[in-house]
Image (tube, helix red, strand yellow):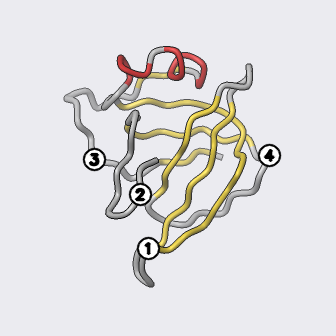
Amino acid sequence: MVLALTFVLSRFSIFPTDTTVEKIVTNKDSFDGGQVSVKGIVSNLKSKAATVQEKYMTFILVGESGGRVNVFISERVELRPGQEVQVTGVYRKVRKTTHRNY
């Protein structure tokens, strides 16, 4: 399954950088704000709602060597823990919403 995260691009490149969770974890500053595409396993999946209209999901994407990055999706999609996915979107060291940081 391929997940396309709905983020606003903050760099001029329209092509995501194929990378790994482990590379992101060890080079957070160089990936911050950049469009990436990364594969991993869904863990700690949570569906939430800031308001009735603002439903979203969060999960941890686990890489091959056990590295972990948090994923925020601004809509609900069909996922299950343990599922292998490819996530494409903008990586942020800290994702800020109205009430929380991720």
Q: Which residue is mark 3?
A: 8
Helix, strand or loop at mark 4: loop
Q: Which residue is mark 4?
A: 82
User: Which residue is painted at 40% across and 81% down in the image?
Assistant: 53
**Vertical placement of 98 versus 66: above or below?**
below
What amino acid does circle 2 point to? Arg
Q: Between disc 2 and disc 3, whose residue precedes?
A: 3
The residues bearing labels 2 and 1 have C-alpha atoms spaced at a distance of 10 Å
Helix, strand or loop at mark 2: loop
Residue nearest the observer in this picture, 73 or 25: 25
The label number, if any, that marks residue 41 in the structure image: none
Helix, strand or loop at mark 3: loop
The residues bearing labels 4 and 3 have C-alpha atoms spaced at a distance of 28 Å
The answer to whether mark 3 and mark 1 are in CB contact below 8 A is no
The residues bearing labels 1 and 4 have C-alpha atoms spaced at a distance of 26 Å
Q: Which residue is mark 1?
A: 50
Q: Between disc 2 and disc 1, whose residue precedes?
A: 1
What amino acid does circle 1 point to? Ala
Q: Which residue is mark 2?
A: 100
Most distant residue in the left direction: 12
